[in-house]
Image (cartoon, rainbow, N blue to C red):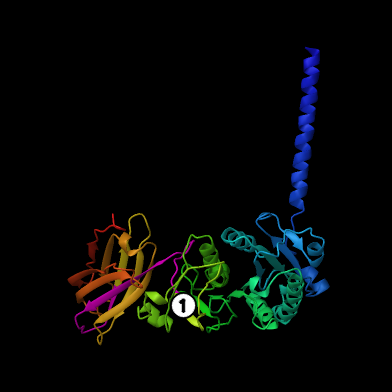
Amino acid sequence: MGWKLKTAETFLSILAFYITSTVGKDEESRSECADFNNTTWLEYRQQGSKLQVQYLLLTRKNTDCASLFSQESLSNNTSYFNSSLPTKIIVHGYRALGSKPSWVKQLAQALLRAQDANVVVVDWVYGASFAYNLVVENYKEVAVQISVLINQLQNHGCKLESFHFIGVSLGAHVSGFVGTLFKGEIGRITGELHLSVCLYFLSDFGISIPVGHADFFLNGGMDQAGCARSRFESMYGYVICDHMRALHVYISALNGTCPLTGIPCSSYEEFLKGRCLGCQGVFNGLLENSGITASPLPQQEKLFLLTTSVPPFCAHHILVQLEVSPLDKTAEVQVTLRTRGLPETEHRLRLETDGTVYRRVIAHLVPLCEIDSIQLKNTGARFYRQGDIHFVSVCISEFPSVGEVESLCVKKIDIRRGSPWNHDFVQLCGND
């Protein structure tokens, strides 16, 4: 019995030592993961806006634990970098408080799920923080340093067309300048900028006008669904929310949770009226390698799409068309689309005395075949708006039209102020 007890104690001691050693190694391994530099206002005042650019590498072999990446690690063959794979280079923008960008890891992992690649993250937090006027002066120097890295990678077998730059905010300017330094031979540049909230694929970037081969304007490129409209509501909602929406839609598209479908149109106003090109001109999602592939390349194609207010921001474009009898006064009509179990979609249309046909593209969470009902309500003021409205027809359809899917129409409707009109649809998706 004593021998057995002694053996058991020895076994438990060995097991405890093993567990302690393993946990220690795991903690040591985790502590070795590379991360962004952070800086404080005090450090900034003492050291100034030194660039201190470093590079972090993520691949499918180390998706959760970034490693520092440099010419030395590449030459010593101590890196997961694979020159035979495409390389994604993520460049963050201005950091007002000197903190690291929280979205980078999410984007990098989405890129790696979509494609086996090297993901190199450019960390220039030191040079991108606090004094914005100095940060703007730094971005070209950052681009020059990145170009040195690109030249080194070329010496190790990488080709310029294998690089895909993804720049956010001021990082889009950095990426674009790198593209300029290599005379437009970088494979692809995707940029997101605040003023236009656009995703620019395949080429250079811009500010509020289309300059890439394909420019996506989310919700027209200005106010985004679900973001605050007043600076008094919250600083995040008013500034950051709009600013970062394109990035989060891009990540949703990479994850396959939200197809990014852009519709070519001459302007956002024409897009909202449903007056755009046919289905053959639609850009359906991220077709290949986390960017658009098209041949021949479009020249400054403006693409519009609507999003919802919550992740993953997917929206189906539904065209509402109203035909009314001539009005004596202007009117306002609220259109509500309903699908059981989902939030309602509401939109108000202003009806004028000199028009009879009104078209509006609105964003709904599900396709046309899953819309259960529609409601119309005359919401105009009692004394200044038309009291009774006669609708010749009310139609909703997919936009742009898909295959042989027909519009859902109801004809000859009279609506009085304060008396909503409702209509249920009986329909099934697919051919079953």
* Residue receiving disc 1: 303
Give the structural element (helix, strand or loop) at label 1.
Answer: strand
Q: Nearer the viewer, residue 207 or 421?
A: 207
Quarter of the image for the N terminus: give it. top right
The answer to whether residue 417 shows anywhere in this view is yes
Estimate the x, y position of residue 239 in percent, counting from the top left.
57, 72
Quarter of the image for the C terminus: give it. bottom left
Whether 69 is drawn above or below 129: the answer is above
The residue positioned 62% from the left and 75% from the top of the image is 187
Whether 114 is drawn above or below 213: the answer is above
Estimate the x, y position of residue 36 in percent, counting from the top left.
73, 63
Q: Nearer the viewer, residue 388 or 119?
A: 119
Query: Please, which residue is most extreme toward the top here?
Result: 1
Res. 185 image quadrant: bottom right
Quick check: is 417 in the magenta stretch? no
Estimate the x, y position of residue 20 in percent, counting from the top left.
77, 37
The residue positioned 76% from the left and 40% from the top of the image is 22
Q: Tally the numbered discs.
A: 1
Q: Is residue 181 left or right of residue 371?
A: right
Provide the residue span drawn in magenta.
Answer: 305-333
The answer to whether residue 241 shows anywhere in this view is no
